[in-house]
Image (cartoon, rainbow, N blue to C red):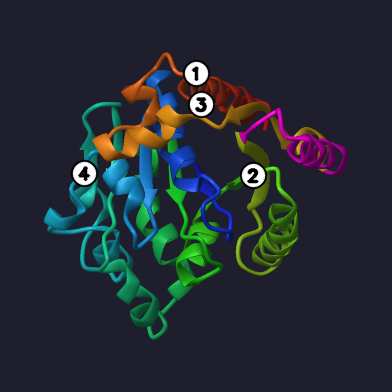
Amino acid sequence: MAKIFCIANQKGGVGKTTTAVNLAAGLAGLEQRVLLVDLDPQGNATMGSGVEKAKLKSSVYQVLIGLAAVKDCAQPCESSGYDVLPANRDLAGAEIELVDLDSRELRLKEALAQVANDYDFILIDCPPALSLLTLNGLCAANGVIVPMQCEYFALEGLSDLVNTIKQVHANLNPDLVIIGLLRVMFDPRMTLQQQVSDQLLEHFGDKVFKTIIPRNVRLAEAPSYGLPGVAFDGASRGAKAYLEFGAEMVERIKQM
């Protein structure tokens, strides 16, 4: 039975998609069976996995509104050995169409239940908003991974996300917990980032992953080649950090 995790943060530009794609590749490199679900209408995780979103015949949009099954829409990421349930701009319309559907916040959970035995991990890349799409991700997941930059405004947004997770846990998904906070785009030369990192450790303790993802040019370049960073340049600091993070995730799950 797959462990299902959301990569979520309502703040944009904090490395959600980079984390989702590289964690999927890192786990696949550890011989785990992985499905990456792109739940963002921008389709960045789709493109970053080497899938051409403009040529999709079916996507997560059709899955959510009940026109297709996950197994019929999932595509392989040839470079890294995981599957991706792709997204494109059609997904933006799902927000409106889901409103009138039964169990609108549980559509993704019901769809993923059909393939839960086919994978060890299912990772959901959520859009940068607390929307109905994000709510579907949170309701389907066992836990949430929160990538965040060590900046002041990131701390402000974190409190809103934690409150949302608590509400979903109380009302819709009693299994939902925060798996951990991942510090990304980290530059140890900046005093403020070190101070915010210390605050996170003081407040959240063991919920903060030990792995720190450094600010790295090679990770930023990789999506333009349709590759995860760990496949684009496995020797780069960023790639090594994500591989380390994948190993830490596997160990953390064993202890749950």
Instruction: Name the one closer to the observer, 169 or 188.
Output: 188
Q: Is residue 194 magenta?
A: yes
Pick whichever of labels 4 and 1 is earlier in the sequence. 4
Q: Is residue 82 above or below residue 29?
A: below
The percent coordinates of residue 210 (x first, y second) are 70, 26
Q: Could you tell me which quadrant the N terminus lies in?
A: top left
Residue at x 54% of width, y 60% of height: 139
Return the residue found at the far bottom.
Answer: 100
Q: Are marks 1 and 3 in contact (CB under 8 Å)?
A: yes
Query: Seen in the image, is 149 located left or right of residue 206?
Result: left
Residue of label 4: 51
Front residue of 20/218: it is: 218
Judging depth in this view, the residue of 179 and 155 nearest the camera is 155
Give the spatial CA distance, label 2 vs label 3.
15 Å
Instruction: Label 3, secondary structure: give it.
Output: helix
For the residues labelled 4 and 1, the Cα–Cα distance comes to 24 Å
- Do the CB atoms of the residues marked 4 and 3 lie less than 8 Å apart? no
**Image point (31%, 41%), residue name:** 48
Q: Main secondary structure of the magenta part?
A: helix
Q: Residue 165's image quarter?
A: bottom right
Secondary structure at badge 2 equals loop
The residue type indicated by label 4 comes to Val
| Disc 2 target residue | 149
Q: Residue at x 43, y 18 (%)?
A: 30
Q: Please state which amino acid type lies under the numbered disc 2.
A: Gln
Q: Nearer the viewer, mark 2 or mark 3?
A: 2
Identify the residue position indicated by label 3 in the image: 242
Q: Nearer the viewer, mark 4 or mark 1?
A: 1
Q: Is residue 141 left or right of residue 154?
A: left
